Image: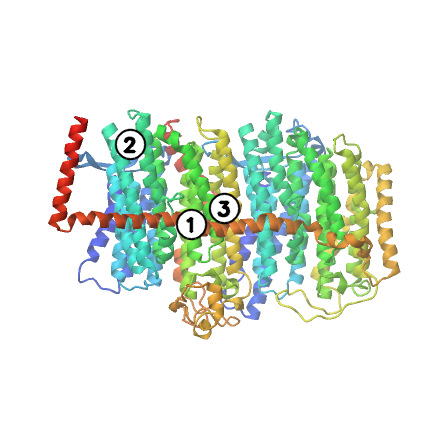
């Protein structure tokens, strides 16, 4: 059975290799229009066929796992839930790598948790690949674009199915690289390039801590295998250190405070990338890893308390920032940070089940929202909501799908978000963490703000007076064409398909709804939405964000965190770098050159002894004789 | 089979000697160079094939002749798991350099002299890794310097003379100290045989003497590695050397220093190593941070890659400083990975310099991915590999070095090494930062942003502003940097890049020299066991753990 898992991981990887090397072969050199188009067509096949196969294999794996008998016992405490859902699990080790210290095992494993996330990843990846065929039409770099998506999918699947922490880390970092390459896809624009670099560096900063956390766990357990780590008896202090370090990586990848700043900028990439990486999968990796190592986190309550505080700050701050953005994609980006903070809060409250449930529904509805936003942007030719409005008649299918998405985001029944958000909030309500009151208050407030910003985006995009006008097509973005029609079918199909789970996935948790807390949060959400509606109703052509008053600019700039980081970290490092170059030239190398000069002058002095001047020689001889005589008298 | 190692030295030496024959045809020289180095590479592969991998910790294929009995100098050669990868790497990089040379005759002419010099260089480099006698090691170590001096001084860039003189004086000074250290070992133990000395694990040398000897040997090797603050010869030498010189400098010569640590300093002087390891580690992490910061503010592409070597070799030295098997493995892995990746980086940077006429990032401008998509992609690949992405070779050396520092050898201060580990971790972020910033400047953006140089604009103040005062405009840069961008389709492969107008993308000859490095970088990245299984047992033997069986 493990060979199926290997295939699932390797198929997208093979797709990436084939797409990169094979798309233009053998006419790679000539970049004519026809060649570009042929290459894009071939690249699309290279991308879509393997991921479809991987999807079928994943579904088969899931059905096998659901039918399998539970193995003797869950491999670690806390795994019962996943074992109950999808009892079958499998694991295989390709080889052990002796390092001279703790060995690394090239191990893959599939169990309930990883299969669930694996399904999410391949479904969203397939939707995005199909969608990109239409969205990136006429982009000469479609081959590399789709190949990088395939590579990214493969890396994410490696994270999901990894049975060893170092293997997991490898996938984790490769995702960071793919994110860099894809955010910077339209690299002609310097801003995109900067956003790509920022995303890579900020996440890498977190990853350093993550790697050290892995070291700590690995040394304590004597193995990097996840099963060994979870079943090892690790002292509490070590667990706290390790999980705190891991949290740095989680904050980086899942864009949590204080490493959240890269995600809004990452919207510089093509919209499908935002759907795939920055909504549904990569940012989910951070939440996934906490759930994967949940027993370790449960043994380190201080870490969970820190996570709770981080989540509380992140969810409310990001939601407020989302309320003031004019760029539709940035609204969704800040909403992603906020929703990920919900999942983190669920984890901090002690319910990995609720967190993963929300991760799955969020993956579906946020991918839907981004793909819908891409269709809108494709249609309008601008990211800004100021340029949108009244679109419900011209793009009816997108409108319907995005309405489902926004409903799920706000947590309105019967959309999936209602159930999963309720599960998280119920978990927070019943938590015994010392941060519980704070967290619960922040969560409820955020529900209200979420209702408000979702309502605002929905109204500003689809209602009110139409402001659409054809813009001149700006290179390099190829998606900016106004043609007054719905998006092509290759874009609408993925949107339509994703709308189904966004609407219905929640019913998987219908039996466990805590109706009391659900009612409270529903009322709060409607309250938030209602306030925005009232403001909008008063003046439909004005931005309801004006209700924030003097607070608006601060929200729009995300509370100046970016500016602060630039002043505190980026500029001093660059100053330091220039200082080092100066020092290297003047001090370190200066010492060398000085030594050289010193030698030269010394040799000049020595040369005096060889000038052939007899007088000098005799003087020297006499002086030496005198010295020796004095020395003999004094010492003798 | 012991003739194999002798042949490994004899083939390039005989090849160089026969080049002096006056009847030699000048035109066939580059093909001749490829043939000789290919024969050497085949021999190296044969050595790797007959090598007994089950016993990688033992010296194999030994040759042991008395050479100068009065000095007790023996001609003792052999390979084990530590030296075998380096020997194969040296033979490979030499071959690739000759392949590169076939497509790119040196700017200074005198092709025959260059081929001769490079073949002598190859003898010295391979000999250093094979020698098992301290003085023999030193002889080969020195043999390398002379040809490299000429490579820089004759075929180098504008400031080649000064760079070459600095290189030779600096490294000779280091060698003198190294020789002193080796002689101290000899006077204390009465033998120069490395195998025997390693087996003794420092027995017979007093602790204080070990410290002095380690200091001397260490300084000598640290100049070559290079370790901060003894690195300043390196940026000049790398920047001025021709492409083949840079590749061999970074790919092989630096490894001779770190190889010395693994072969001589640490196994023979274990107590000295234990006493000085904290200092070594501290200088190593300072080098990591310092090198990365220096890279961040560089403007010259080749100079930046040179400084990146300081950072990467810092990780290698940190691995040694931990005095653990995993740290040694890390250092040896990092050695090979750095040789492959930095070799590739210098090849690509050389290709860029040749096309644009400059390696200055400001003058290169942006948009390389548009003008030269393949070269831009290869540069991106090499940088990503160099910043230590998992799945590529650079990752394992860095990761294992940090892992070693997490728990250093008994007797070393653990908190201190934890600090080193944390600083090294920050170094990896800075490493990523300078590579990505460079990629962003050079490969991204629009090609039109190129700062124009040449007659059309040399008169304007703009160039002065950009270049800063006092920096003359290179005459050979004129006219090439402003290219017709929108229509720049790649020229037929194999064509020489024209002086103006279109820039030709990667040629078949360049691909032949570069692709092997790409392939090996990926291979060792996804299958680190290929190297670790070799070095592991040898490292265990050094520390006296489990002998050669591993």
Q: Which residue is mark 3?
A: B388
For the N terminus of chain B, give its image quadrant: top left
Q: Which residue is mark 1?
A: A584
Q: Residue at x 41, y 32 (%)?
A: B323
Write down the quadrant of residue A4 in the picture: top right
Q: Residue at x 52, y 59 (%)?
A: B441
For the C terminus of chain B, give its image quadrant: top left
x then y, percent, for residue B162: 32, 56
Residue B195 marker: 2
Please check whether the numbered discs 2 and 3 fall on a single chain. Answer: yes
Chain letter belonging to callout 2: B
Q: CA distance from mark 2 to mark 1?
A: 40 Å
Q: Is residue B210 left or right of residue B435?
A: left
Q: CA distance from mark 2 to mark 3?
A: 34 Å
Q: Nearer the viewer, mark 3 or mark 1?
A: 1
Q: CA distance from mark 3 to mark 1?
A: 25 Å
Mark 2, Cα crowd under 10 Å, few <14 / some 14-19 / many 20+, is some
């Amino acid at each position: 059975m493990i060979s199926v898992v290997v295939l699932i991981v390797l198929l997208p990887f093979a797709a990436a290799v084939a797409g990169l090397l094979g798309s233009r072969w053998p006419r790679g050199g000539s970049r004519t229009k026809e060649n570009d188009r042929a290459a894009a067509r071939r690249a699309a096949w290279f991308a879509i066929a393997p991921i479809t196969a991987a999807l079928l294999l994943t579904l088969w794996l899931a059905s096998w796992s659901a039918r399998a008998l539970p193995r003797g016992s869950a491999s670690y405490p806390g795994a019962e839930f996943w074992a109950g859902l999808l009892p079958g699990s499998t694991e295989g080790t390709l080889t052990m790598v002796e390092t001279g210290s703790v060995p690394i095992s090239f191990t893959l494993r599939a169990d309930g948790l990883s299969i669930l996330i694996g399904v999410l990843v391949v479904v969203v990846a397939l939707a995005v690949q199909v969608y990109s065929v239409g969205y990136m039409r006429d982009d000469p770099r479609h081959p590399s674009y789709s190949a990088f998506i395939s590579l990214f999918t493969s890396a994410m699947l490696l994270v999901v199915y990894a049975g060893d922490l170092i293997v997991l880390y490898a996938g984790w970092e490769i995702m960071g690289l793919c994110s860099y390459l894809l955010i910077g896809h339209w690299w002609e624009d310097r801003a995109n390039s900067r956003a790509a670099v920022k995303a890579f560096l900020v996440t890498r900063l977190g990853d350093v801590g993550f790697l050290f956390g892995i070291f700590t766990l690995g040394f304590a357990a004597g193995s990097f295998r996840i099963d060994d780590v979870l079943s090892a008896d690790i002292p509490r202090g070590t667990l706290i250190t390790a999980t705190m370090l891991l949290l740095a990586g989680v904050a980086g990848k899942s864009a949590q405070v204080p490493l959240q700043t890269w995600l809004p900028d990452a919207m510089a990439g093509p919209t499908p990338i935002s759907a795939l990486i920055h909504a549904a999968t990569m940012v989910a990796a951070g939440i996934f890893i906490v759930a994967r190592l949940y027993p370790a986190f449960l043994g380190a309550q201080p870490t969970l308390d820190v996570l709770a505080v981080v989540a509380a700050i992140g969810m409310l701050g990001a939601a407020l920032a989302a309320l003031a953005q004019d760029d539709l994609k940035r609204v969704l980006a800040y909403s992603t940070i906020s929703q990920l903070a919900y999942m983190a809060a669920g984890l901090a409250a002690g319910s990995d089940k609720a967190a993963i449930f929300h991760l799955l529904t969020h993956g579906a509805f946020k991918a839907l929202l981004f793909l819908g936003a891409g269709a809108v942007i494709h249609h309008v030719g601008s990211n800004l909501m100021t340029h949108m409005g009244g679109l419900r008649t011209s793009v009816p299918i997108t409108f319907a799908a995005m309405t489902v998405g926004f409903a799920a985001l706000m947590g309105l029944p019967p959309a999936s978000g209602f159930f999963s958000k309720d599960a998280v909030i119920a978990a927070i309500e019943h938590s015994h963490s010392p941060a519980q009151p704070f967290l619960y208050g922040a969560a409820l407030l955020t529900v209200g703000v979420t209702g408000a910003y979702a309502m605002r985006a929905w109204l500003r995009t689809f209602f009110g007076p139409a402001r659409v006008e054809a813009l001149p097509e700006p290179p390099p973005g190829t998606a900016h064409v106004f043609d007054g029609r719905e998006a092509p079918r290759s874009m609408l199909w993925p949107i339509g398909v994703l709308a189904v789970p966004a609407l219905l996935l929640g019913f998987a948790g219908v039996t466990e709804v805590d109706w009391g807390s659900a009612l409270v949060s529903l009322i709060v959400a409607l309250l938030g939405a209602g306030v925005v509606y009232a403001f909008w109703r008063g003046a439909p052509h004005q931005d309801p964000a004006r209700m924030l008053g003097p607070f608006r600019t601060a929200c729009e700039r995300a509370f100046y965190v970016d500016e602060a980081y630039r002043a505190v970290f980026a500029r001093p490092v660059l100053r330091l770098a220039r200082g080092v170059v100066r020092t290297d030239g003047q001090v370190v190398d200066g010492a060398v050159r000085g030594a050289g000069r010193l030698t030269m002058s010394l040799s000049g002095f020595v040369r005096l002894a060889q000038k052939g001047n007899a007088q000098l020689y005799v003087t020297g001889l006499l002086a030496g004789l005198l010295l020796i005589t004095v020395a003999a008298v004094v010492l003798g | 089979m012991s003739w194999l190692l002798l042949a490994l030295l004899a083939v390039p030496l005989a090849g160089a000697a026969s080049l002096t024959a006056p009847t030699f045809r000048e035109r066939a020289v580059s093909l001749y160079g490829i043939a000789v180095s290919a024969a050497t590479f085949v021999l190296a592969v044969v050595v790797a094939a007959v090598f007994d991998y089950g016993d990688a910790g033992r010296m194999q294929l030994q040759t042991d002749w008395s050479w100068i009995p009065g000095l007790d100098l023996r001609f003792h050669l052999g390979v084990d798991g530590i030296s075998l990868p380096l020997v194969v790497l040296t033979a490979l990089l030499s071959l690739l350099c000759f392949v590169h040379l076939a497509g790119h005759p040196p700017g200074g002419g005198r092709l025959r002299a260059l081929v001769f010099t490079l073949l002598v260089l190859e003898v010295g480099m391979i000999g250093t890794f094979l020698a098992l006698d301290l003085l023999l090691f030193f002889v080969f170590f020195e043999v390398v310097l002379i040809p490299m001096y000429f490579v820089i001084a004759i075929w180098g860039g504008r400031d080649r003379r000064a760079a070459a003189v600095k290189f030779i004086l600096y490294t000779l000074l280091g060698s003198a100290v190294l020789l002193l250290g080796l002689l101290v070992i000899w006077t204390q133990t009465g033998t120069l045989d490395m195998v025997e000395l390693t087996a003794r694990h420092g027995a017979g040398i007093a602790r204080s003497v070990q410290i002095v000897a380690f200091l001397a040997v260490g300084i000598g090797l640290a100049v070559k590695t290079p370790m901060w603050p003894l690195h300043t010869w390196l940026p000049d030498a790398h920047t001025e050397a021709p492409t083949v010189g840079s590749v061999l400098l970074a790919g092989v010569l630096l490894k001779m220093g770190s190889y010395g640590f693994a072969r001589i300093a640490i196994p023979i002087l274990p107590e000295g190593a234990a006493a000085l390891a904290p200092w070594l580690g501290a200088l190593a992490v300072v080098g990591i941070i310092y090198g990365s910061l220096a890279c961040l503010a560089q403007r010259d592409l080749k100079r930046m890659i040179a400084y990146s070597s300081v950072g990467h070799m810092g990780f290698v030295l940190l691995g040694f400083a931990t005095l653990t098997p995993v740290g040694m493995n890390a250092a040896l892995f990092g050695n090979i990975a750095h040789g492959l990746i930095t070799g590739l980086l210098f090849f690509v940077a050389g290709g860029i310099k040749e096309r644009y006429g400059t390696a200055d990032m400001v003058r290169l401008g942006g948009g390389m991915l548009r003008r030269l998509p393949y070269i831009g992609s290869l540069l991106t690949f090499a940088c990503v590999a160099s910043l230590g992405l998992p799945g590529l070779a650079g990752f394992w050396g860095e990761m294992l070095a940090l892992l070693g520092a997490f728990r250093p050898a008994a007797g070393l201060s653990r908190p201190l090494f934890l600090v080193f580990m944390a600083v090294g971790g920050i170094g990896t972020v800075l490493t990523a930062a300078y590579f990505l910033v460079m990629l962003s400047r050079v490969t991204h953006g629009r090609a039109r942003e190129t700062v124009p140089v040449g007659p059309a604009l040399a008169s304007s103040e703009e160039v002065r502003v950009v270049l800063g005062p006092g920096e003359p405009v290179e005459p050979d840069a004129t006219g090439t940097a402003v290219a017709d961008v929108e229509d720049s389709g790649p020229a037929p492969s194999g064509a020489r890049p024209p002086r103006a107008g279109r820039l030709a993308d990667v040629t078949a000859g360049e691909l032949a020299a570069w692709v092997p490095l790409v392939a090996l970088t990926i291979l060792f990245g996804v299958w680190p066991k290929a190297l670790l299984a070799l070095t592991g047992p040898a490292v265990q033997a050094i520390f006296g753990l489990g002998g050669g069986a591993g």
